[in-house]
Image (cartoon, rainbow, N blue to C red):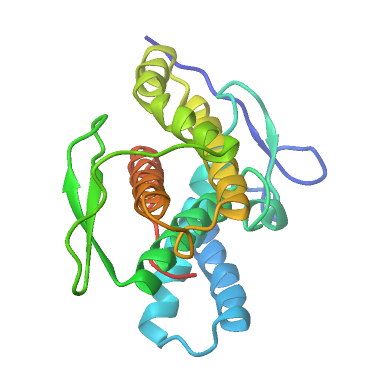
Amino acid sequence: RHVTFGSVLGEDRKLMKTRSGENVPLRELLEEACRRARKIIDEKNPDLSEDEKNDIAEKIGIGAVKYADLSQYRTTDYIFSWYKMLSLHGNTAPYLQNAYVRIRSIFRKAGAIAVATPLWGVGAAQYEEAGHRPVATAFTLTEPTEINLAKRLCQFAEIVPQVLNGFGPNILANYLFELANSFHAFYEACPVLKSEEPARSSRLMLSDLTARVLQRGLDLLGIKVPERM
């Protein structure tokens, strides 16, 4: 079966070309993406090591280019914009990667170790903190934002077959964007580390499962996630 695609346009809404009128080589595009991502990292996290900066820049830069393309309906033309694709806001790879990084930060602060157990194909987790027995055995959902996040997570198993059947990676991209939105709303409304048990453990579990789905979903799109940004 032949699968058709739209075109990538410059900001002048014409087919994206070099100044000499030739097609832009993908290698040059990805290298420029990494350079731009590295500049942002230098400004926001100057204390990171050179290796860390380069690794993060590659994941953000290449991920941004991939996501900008895959998040579009495949037959739709779209305008290539460095500003939009590297933004930490909106439907971009950095926005999704940042949601994952925020969750990883929660666990670093908690000193918690995730003990994976299978659930929905991605794994939930129980948690063991220094000097404590594992306490997370079930979800305790009471707040609207955590209920909404849990419902969104349950949709993951339904989304992947839709992507395969319709040759539509944008379906998965849009789902991950909505998942990240749901997580950020949950994070703002529901304290995780400062809440009392059993809500604390439940929210840790919910956060971890969100990170796993984000990582798995982005991996299916060929996009890697950094541990820090």
Q: In this view, does 103 lie above or below 181?
A: below
Q: Tell which residue pokes out farthest to the top in this image.
A: 1
Q: Which of 65/193 is in front? A: 193
State the quadrant of the N terminus.
top left
Q: In this view, does 131 lie above or below 86?
A: below
Residue at image position (38%, 12%) is 165
Q: Would residue 25 be visible to someone looking at this image?
A: no
Residue 228 pos. (x, y %): 44, 70
Residue 167 placement: quadrant:
top left
* 12 lies left or right of 136: right
Residue 109 pos. (x, y %): 40, 73
Label tally: 0
Residue 69 placement: quadrant:
top right
Residue at image position (44%, 13%) is 166
Q: Is residue 46 above or below residue 117?
A: below
Residue at image position (18%, 37%) is 118
Q: Which of 85/79 is in front? A: 85
Q: Which of 224/193 is in front? A: 193
Residue at image position (39%, 63%) is 104
Residue 15 pos. (x, y %): 70, 38
